Image (tube, rainbow, N blue to C red):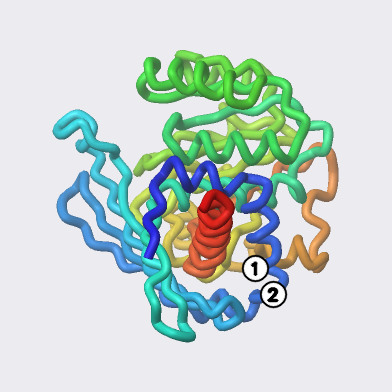
């Protein structure tokens, strides 16, 4: 068994490769996605959550068990990351344990790759400006993926802690070689005329309001998950053309979409399709330059199996090459 830490995940699994891996998964295993177990959620207290998710691919002959912890008070209490965890990867032919992988880093990359694929189908091809709400690891990965997909020239970031937004802007400007600017007020993002909006928070109340934050022609990537969380207000969900990573998961776990359905202002058919419909050409995605499109993702087990297998194989090749 090999151990793959967060730095190695980012080193051995590029965003572009992860997007290719996930596209392959959707092409090869669309029928298998809904047969994977749902994640289990254990709430230790109001600020601490443990999530676990098993997944299996007969095509890859791989099984993965992912554990992710989200302890919001960790940074201030213990100087630890708010999100941590590990993924165990097994060979199902022999039951051999192949790798122990940092799950927070792996989740960030594969979640970013999901949104990158959605951006390819749902955003305007001439999109150049991105707004980002949130400044954590997931927000960084999503901006990375969007820049991999569209010719982005500038990005603006808002975070509840302005110091976090400033650090995000510094780091991502260097990494992406574009101008990333921190703003003090959320509404400043819309004033800059963004084409794509990234929403990557753990908020239990909407951080996006249709009348204040959404412009004609915008594409929105939202990754808020868990039934008690609502990144998006009701009007944004209702008025956008909605696509998801997996319909069954979003209807059970995405609080903002669940709430919109519960109000009966929309029903399940408001979800136009998932990524497989876009990748396989069953839906055209964006239909006009002024349409507002929304991609909502909650993640599912096969994503982790494919991403984990890719980073494992890349790490193994690198080690054999250096032997």
Q: Quadrant of residue 288?
A: top right
The 10 Å Cα crowd at callout 2, few under 14, some 14 to 19, many 20 or more, is: few
Residue drawn 51% across the image and 81% down it = 35
Q: Which residue is mark 2?
A: 28
Residue drawn 63% across the image and 26% down it = 176
Tell me if residue 77 can be seen.
Answer: yes
Q: Position of residue 155 (x, y in %)?
A: 62, 22
Residue drawn 40% across the image and 56% down it = 101
Q: Position of residue 100 (x, y in %)?
A: 36, 60
In the image, 307 versus 156, the foreground residue is 307
In the image, 62 versus 252, the foreground residue is 62
Label 1: which secondary element: helix
Residue lying at the far bottom in this picture: please name it: 93
Tell me if residue 297 can be seen.
Answer: no
The 10 Å Cα crowd at callout 1, few under 14, some 14 to 19, many 20 or more, is: many
**In this view, 61 is above or below 86:** below
């Amino acid at each position: 068994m090999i151990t793959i830490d967060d730095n190695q995940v980012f080193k051995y699994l590029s965003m572009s490769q992860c997007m290719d891996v996930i596209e392959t998964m959707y092409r090869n295993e669309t029928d298998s996605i809904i047969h994977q177990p749902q994640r289990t959620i254990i709430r230790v207290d109001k600020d601490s959550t443990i999530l676990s998710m098993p997944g299996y691919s007969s095509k890859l002959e791989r099984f993965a068990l992912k554990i992710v912890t989200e302890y919001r008070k960790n940074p201030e209490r213990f100087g630890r990351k708010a999100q941590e965890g590990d993924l165990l990867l097994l060979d199902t032919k022999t039951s051999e344990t192949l790798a122990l992988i940092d799950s927070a880093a792996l989740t960030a990359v594969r979640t970013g790759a999901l949104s990158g694929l959605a951006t390819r189908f749902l955003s305007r091809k001439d999109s150049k400006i991105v707004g980002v709400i949130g400044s954590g690891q997931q927000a960084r990965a999503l901006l990375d993926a969007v820049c991999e997909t569209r010719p982005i020239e500038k990005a603006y970031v808002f975070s509840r802690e302005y110091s976090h937004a400033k650090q995000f802007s510094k780091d991502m400007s260097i990494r992406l070689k574009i101008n990333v600017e921190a703003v003090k007020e959320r509404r400043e993002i819309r004033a800059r005329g963004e084409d794509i909006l990234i929403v990557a928070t753990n908020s239990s109340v909407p951080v996006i309001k249709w009348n204040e934050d959404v412009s004609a022609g915008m594409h929105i990537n939202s990754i808020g998950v868990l039934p008690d969380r609502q990144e998006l207000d009701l009007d944004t969900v209702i008025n956008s053309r909605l696509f998801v990573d997996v319909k069954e998961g979003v209807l059970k776990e995405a609080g903002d979409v669940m709430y919109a359905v519960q109000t009966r202002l929309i029903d399940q058919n408001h979800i136009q399709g998932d990524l497989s419909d876009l990748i396989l050409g069953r839906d055209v995605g964006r239909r006009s330059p002024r349409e507002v499109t929304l991609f909502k993702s909650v993640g599912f087990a096969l994503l982790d199996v494919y991403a984990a297998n890719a980073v494992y194989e890349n790490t193994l090749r690198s080690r054999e090459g250096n032997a």
